[in-house]
Amino acid sequence: MWKISQFTVVHDLACRGRPGLLLVLNTATQRSMVVAEPTWAAAAGSAACPDSAEPSTRTVIAALADAGYLVAEALDENAGFLDGFDRRRLAPARINPIIAFTTDCNIACTYCYEEGVRATTMTEPVVAATVRWLERRIVLDGVIEVVPNLFGGEPLLHRRLLTDFMTRVNAMGDAHSATVAYAMSSNGMLLTEELARVLAQLRLRQIQISLDGPPAVHDQRRVGHRGQSTFAQALRGIEHACRWIPDVTVKVNFDRHNAAAVPDLFDELAARGTAERLTVKLEAIAHQFPGSKACHPSSYVIPPETPEMADTYLGLTQAARRRGLRVTPDTAHTTPCMYTSQWGVIIGPDGGISKCISLVGRPEHEVGNVLAGDWDTDRYDAAMNVRKKVTDCVSEKCAYLPVCAGGCSYESAVRGMSTATRFCTKPALERYHFGRQLLRHEARLTELGVTPLGDPDFSLPVAPAPGRAPTPVLLPMPTRRDSAT
């Protein structure tokens, strides 16, 4: 009658000093629990025929089925996941297109994927076409909420262009009874308190400003064009934003160069008393395309498929939480991402439409242009064809399909593969999701005799010499029991 869900993963907590206790999680429902091994074994062994089980075991089986750890024997979970995935990513009522007003910037980050892209800024025809593109989503596609992400380069370099766009989109949305609000990604250096107030009045609800560590580390990575430091100005921008903008996010771009120093940044934010107003978003620096003009050594990039990546995300998450800072729930994985979501696009300064933020300014990856109306249907449909990418995941009955969906299309493209080729990160996902649940249930697990988490319990990488990757020191992987083979 029942079977263990292929998305249920079972970890033996003997690796944390507590044999006989299991941590069970389901990647589709995002539920997790701690259960005694005999209880789990009895329920799993009798799931196919619960009527023959002891009454207490039948009760456990019913609870596990209700929570999704067990599913009906006849259920095709892969088909069910893909159907649900399509419902979430296709025809959404809310859209979050990224509007890159300019590729010009007032600083020169060492790892910027736009480095070497010719600096251009939106002209009036492109702005008008972008507003029309948004209007078509409301009128033709039934979208009722539009939340553009205002992006660059540095969007605040062109304040008048920015505020004019917001005013026009607000009027257009109001005319169609649609909800309009904005998010913004900025380096924060040009954000004054007065400008923060104006942007908030124009419906800016969320702003993301980057800090990559304490001043000495941040200023090595996010540097002015004349070599000047940027930390103090960015921090002032965050403080101005906190006074006017409801949701303020500090984005930490990390790799082997700065990861070990990031907890010092969290100490500084906590000491300033701003922790309760801030959310932290952690984002790993990715590899660049061949021929990139970025000067950041490639040896600093943490391979996204490795346990080292999982440990770094977990260690930084733990460090933030210990200091009273919230961490965004999309840290380490976002499924569906903008590449696979309908209307998940970035519109560049020339009107080009791309499906990934890291592909802006690369014509070979564009799927259309707002000046031409919408997009090249064949190229857009190819980008949206997730089912092709997950073929191997489905055949393997991978337990991590719901949190991966075939992996990152950019990571495939940057390695010279088609964006429709899957990029498997299962070793990192296994470790990350186990560690995430250890953090989630930390207090209860400690009460049950599980070895308490240290600070940090997950090792952070140390910067290698340029051109040489380090050998990370990692926790031993736990014994894993899941229904995937």
Image (cartoon, rainbow, N blue to C red):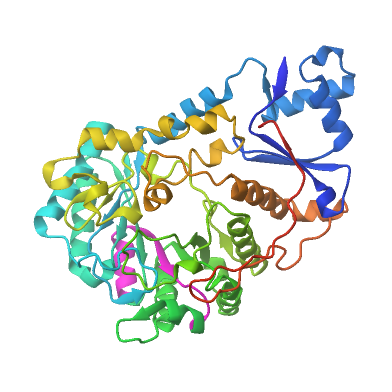
Which residue sits at x=67%, y=23%? 71
Q: Is residue 200 magenta?
A: yes
Residue 191 in sight in this render: no
Q: Nearer the viewer, residue 104 or 113?
A: 113
Q: Could you tell me which quadrant the C terminus lies in?
A: top right
Q: Is residue 265 magenta?
A: no
Which residue sits at x=25%, y=37%? 379
Q: Nearer the viewer, residue 173 or 207?
A: 207
User: Residue 31 location, x and y as percent?
Assistant: 66, 39
Q: Which picture quadrant has residue 225?
A: bottom left
Q: Is residue 263 left or right of residue 248?
A: right
User: Residue 482 location, x and y as percent?
Assistant: 71, 35
Which residue sits at x=49%, y=68%? 299
User: Residue 342 location, x and y as percent?
Assistant: 34, 37
Residue at the far left in the pictured view: 125
Give the mark count: 0
The boundaries of the magenta stretch are 194-215
